């Protein structure tokens, strides 16, 4: 839980963060005054008022606060698995300053009131900004459009709409939704899974292994055919679609083509699809059961390449907490989903930066600025620039991290990274100049 005030750098006074690598552009200083970045780079120290505190960040990387476009917080309805408070704590500990909370709660976030309540609870907790994602269809039933316009015009300013957990399968409904959101610059985030090709029981990549394990398969084409359909619908409607949790090389090919045609499509990949493969299922451990399923190494390689070359725009966690009673079942009956907020940066650091596929500037783009831009956020993702809100994440790029599921801020323990050694970890997170996390301790609005 939270710690005493003494452990927390006070930030009411101006703060000079010295010597950090500024998002991969070289070492410099950051001056934070009144919750904003007041100066950046070599002259920041000259501009610091005499009373400014110093925070020595030599050897660390400073990133703009991370933004997660795909989080499940389970409140309202399943507060035994996660609450807005605990999920926000996990997010802050993981270097995030904003998350988008998916709509598949009970009840579903399909009204302006429901969306405003989530935003308010997030602000009250005060660890990260919690932006509600609005449902595309009422109760995620896939039939009638939800109150998209009312949610957009509400205090919650909803811009991202998704039936995530379910695919908007009816092409006519998807078309209507895409048409509707153009009036306020929204985006539909699609869970691409054709339920007629991969139904509710499909729980494993369809291939040699699914046959051997006797588990119902989920073929890549169930994803790829929806991605292909949706980019054509986006072109037809001159609207904007975002592909959630891309998992196959075939989807990457479709995205590459769609982007070459100027179609307004963006896409995300999860940390688990960048590192874990389907053969982990040979033990039937349900912690590795997720939608879409873990895929073979060829797909993982294609996803890494696509993230590095920009075909896949961003990394999103799909943090999906589940209680033991829902997860610790025979594989076929267990819930889909795995935790991700606290480990995402370490996984990306390990797979993409340490192994030379991306720079820290790419991490800033794929985990902060671009997710914020896709979500239409106005108070996040401006980068480390003068005048921007001081949303800053300090990363120790060489730290050896051994993941321990027991030390999570999440209420749930379905952590597929338990026991793994990763390179690079979050040192400190700051939201509008206020430290929200440092070395695993977290502080909210009330601290
Ligand atoms: N990813 C998952 O396996 N599960 C998600 C839903 C989803 O993202 O499809 C959940 O809500 O648990
Ligand atoms: Zn999904
Ligand atoms: Zn999801």
Image (cartoon, grey):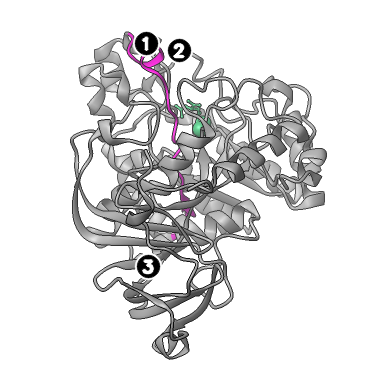
Q: Earlier in the sequence, mark 1 or mark 3?
A: 3
Q: Which residue is mark 2?
A: 201
The image position of residue 376, as x and y in percent, is: 65, 55
The answer to whether residue 312 shows anywhere in this view is no
Q: Earlier in the sequence, mark 2 or mark 1?
A: 2
The residue under the point 23% across, 33% down is 418
Residue 370, compared with residue 72, is above or below; it is below
Crowdedness of circle 3 by 10 Å Cα count: few (<14), some, many (20+)?
many
Q: Nearer the viewer, mark 2 or mark 3?
A: 3
- The chief SS type of the magenta part is loop
Crowdedness of circle 2 by 10 Å Cα count: few (<14), some, many (20+)?
few
Residue 396, compared with residue 294, is above or below; it is below
Q: Earlier in the sequence, mark 2 or mark 3?
A: 3
Pick the residue in front: 4 or 270. 4
Could you say which quadrant of the image residue 213 lies in? top left
Pick the residue in front: 217 or 82. 82
Q: Pointers 2 and 1 in contact (CB under 8 A)?
A: yes
Q: Which residue is mark 1?
A: 332
The residue under the point 56% across, 33% down is 191
The residue under the point 60% across, 54% down is 374
Q: Pointers 2 and 3 in contact (CB under 8 A)?
A: no
Label 2 and label 3: CA atoms lie apart by 43 Å
Label 1 and label 3: CA atoms lie apart by 43 Å
The image position of residue 205, as x and y in percent, is: 36, 25
Q: Which residue is mark 3?
A: 62
Residue 114, compared with residue 100, is above or below; it is above
Q: Secondary structure at mark 2?
A: loop
The image position of residue 169, as x and y in percent, is: 64, 26
Q: Secondary structure at mark 3?
A: strand
Q: Nearer the viewer, mark 1 or mark 3?
A: 3
The answer to whether residue 214 shows anywhere in this view is yes
Residues rendered magenta in the picture = 310-329
């Amino acid at each position: 839980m939270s710690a005493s005030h003494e452990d927390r750098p006070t930030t009411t006074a101006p703060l000079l963060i010295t010597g950090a690598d500024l998002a991969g552009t070289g070492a410099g200083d950051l001056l934070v005054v009144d919750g904003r970045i007041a100066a950046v780079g070599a002259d920041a120290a000259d501009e610091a008022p005499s009373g400014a505190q110093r925070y020595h960040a030599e050897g660390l990387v400073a990133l703009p606060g991370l933004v997660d476009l795909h989080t499940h917080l389970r409140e309202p309805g399943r507060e035994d698995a996660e609450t807005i408070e605990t999920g926000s704590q996990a997010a802050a500990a993981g270097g995030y300053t904003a998350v988008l909370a998916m709509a598949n709660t009970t009840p579903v976030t399909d009204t302006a009131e429901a969306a405003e309540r989530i935003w308010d609870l997030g602000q009250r907790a005060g660890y990260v900004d919690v932006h509600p994602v609005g449902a595309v269809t009422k109760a995620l039933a896939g039939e009638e459009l939800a109150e998209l316009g009312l949610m957009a015009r509400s205090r919650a300013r909803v811009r991202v709409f998704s039936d995530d957990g379910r695919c908007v399968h009816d092409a006519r409904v998807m078309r209507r939704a895409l048409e509707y959101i153009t009036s306020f610059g929204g985006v539909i985030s699609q869970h691409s899974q054709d339920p007629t090709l991969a139904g509710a029981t499909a729980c494993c990549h369809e291939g040699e292994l699914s046959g051997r394990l006797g588990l119902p398969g989920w073929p890549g084409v169930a994803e790829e055919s929806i991605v292909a359909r949706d980019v054509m619908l986006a072109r037809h409607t001159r609207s904007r679609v975002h592909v959630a949790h891309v998992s196959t090389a075939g989807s990457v090919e479709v995205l590459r083509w769609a982007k070459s045609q100027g179609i307004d499509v963006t896409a995300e990949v999860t940390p688990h699809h960048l590192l874990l493969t389907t053969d982990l299922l040979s033990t039937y451990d349900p912690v590795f059961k997720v939608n879409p399923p873990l895929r073979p190494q060829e797909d993982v390689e294609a996803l890494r390449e696509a993230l590095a070359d920009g075909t896949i725009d961003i990394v999103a966690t799909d943090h999906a907490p589940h209680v033991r009673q829902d997860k610790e079942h025979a594989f076929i009956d267990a819930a889909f989903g795995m935790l991700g907020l606290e480990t995402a940066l370490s996984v990306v650091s390990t797979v993409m930066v340490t192994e030379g596929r991306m720079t820290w500037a790419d991490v800033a783009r794929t985990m902060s600025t671009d997710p914020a831009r896709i979500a239409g956020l106005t108070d996040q993702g401006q980068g480390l620039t003068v005048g921007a809100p001081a949303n800053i994440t300090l990363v120790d790029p060489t730290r050896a991290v051994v993941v321990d599921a027991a030390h999570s801020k999440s209420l749930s323990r379905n952590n597929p990274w338990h026991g793994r050694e990763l390179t690079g970890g979050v040192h400190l997170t700051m939201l509008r100049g206020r430290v929200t996390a440092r070395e695993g301790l977290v502080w909210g609005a009330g601290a």
